[in-house]
Structure formats: C-alpha cells, structure tokens
Image (cartoon, rainbow, N blue to C red):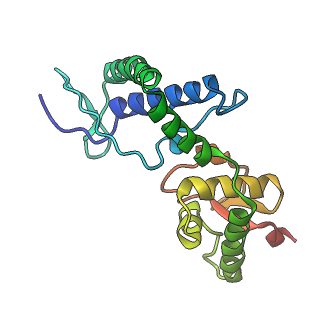
Amino acid sequence: MGGWAHGGSHEQGFREAVTTVVARYAQNVGLREGNDGLSDDEVFQGLTAVVHVTMPDPQFAGPTKTCLDNPEAKMFVQKVVLERFGDWLDCHPAEAETITRHVVEVAAPAPAATQQAVLAVLTKADENKNHPYYYGTTLADVAQSSGLTASQARRALAALTAAGKVHTTTYHGDTQVDLSQVEPPWAYTYFLPRSDLS
C-alpha cells in the first residue's frame, strides 16, 4: 500500500528533534541561559522543510486519511535528525550560530512597542463588545491586524496577560489559557483588554 502523507508521525518526529537540537546547541554555546526550552513554533519560524519517508505498510489517520500514523516513522526520523543535525551544527559553527541566533531572537520577550501594538488592536476590537456575537479577538486576528507573526503576537499576548492587561475567554466564559499550547485555528480562545473586566 502506498500514498502521500501530509503531516503526521514523521513530521512530529522531525519537529521535535530539530527543536531539541537547536535548543541544546543554543544553551551549550551560551546563546540562551536557563533551562526553559524553545517551542517548535519559535524554532520553525521561517523554516521550510520536506520530510520524505518510505514505509512498507503505511497507516493513515485523520479525516482525509492523509496523515501518517506509524509510530516507528516518528522514532526513526527523530533518531536520525537528532544524530545527523546535531553533528552538522557542530561541523558548521558559522551556520549554526546564524540559525541559533535567529531562533533566540524570535523567542525573546516581546518588545514594549509590540505589546502596545497588540493592546491597541485589542482595544479597537473591543469597541464591538456590545455585539451579541462578540467574544473578543483571536490570536490569528491579533497577528493579522498588527502585522505580526503568530509567534510574535503570542509572545506579546503572553506578556500582556502576565502583566494583567489582557485576559482570555472562550464560548464558555472566562478561562485560564496556556499560551504555549494555543495552536491553529485558535478558534475557541479570545483575548480582551483587561479594562473589559471593570
């Protein structure tokens, strides 16, 4: 049986391995301090990759049956990338530093100007708060309206939430949301300026 897989276990193994290698390298060379890890969203910003595996008996999952579901594919890809990509970074220090510095910059706390831009978007959108179908602004809308990437908007929202300037809600009312776990389509999490609570 054959077929094309769009996402799945091989992609998951690739993302986890690359993220692990880059985070470890950044810490080893002193570009990132502490034990807090990097997210794959941060590591993969601006990265395009094709992961091709050939499976003798591929298993597919998902509604369209195009998502590879073989756990051995994840383990194999992860093992190879952990070994080979780590070796490649060690053998190419200039390129490794360029990659790592880019990732560390992406993962840096959102600048005050970025936070202000995001807060302005939320405040403007909050003018619709009396509309019966207005819940708040999604992360995707925040990013698009402020001209930021999803990662930048997420970091700004995390900083604003920690500072008490923004809160989150869902269809079911106010809730605590771990922003590191907010993934597309961000359809059920909304962000509101804290003034909405007053």
Residue 110 point in image, percent of width and height: 69, 55
Q: Which residue is drawn at 70% across and 49% down?
A: 109
> Does 43 appear above or below 1?
below
Residue 130 point in image, percent of width and height: 71, 82
Q: Who is closer to the viewer here, 100 or 168?
A: 100
Drawn side of residue 121 relative to residue 193, left or right: left
Is any part of residue 183 visible from this angle? yes
Q: Which residue is drawn at 56% across and 63% down?
A: 148
Drawn side of residue 176 relative to residue 65, left or right: right
> Does 171 appear above or below 81?
below
Q: Residue at x 67, y 45 (%)?
A: 178
Residue 105 point in image, percent of width and height: 61, 46
Report how many numbered discs are placed on residues in the image: 0
For residue 11, what is the image quadrant? top left
> Does 24 appear above or below 134?
above
Q: Quadrant of the C terminus?
A: bottom right
Q: Quadrant of the N terminus?
A: top left
For residue 18, what is the image quadrant? top left
Is any part of residue 173 visible from this angle? no
Q: Residue furthest left?
A: 1
Q: Residue at x 68, y 80 (%)?
A: 124
Drawn side of residue 109 relative to residue 26, left or right: right
Q: Who is closer to the viewer here, 61 or 150?
A: 150
Q: Who is closer to the viewer here, 195 or 95?
A: 95
> Does 172 appear above or below 102?
below
Q: Residue furthest front?
A: 94
Drawn side of residue 11 relative to residue 133, left or right: left
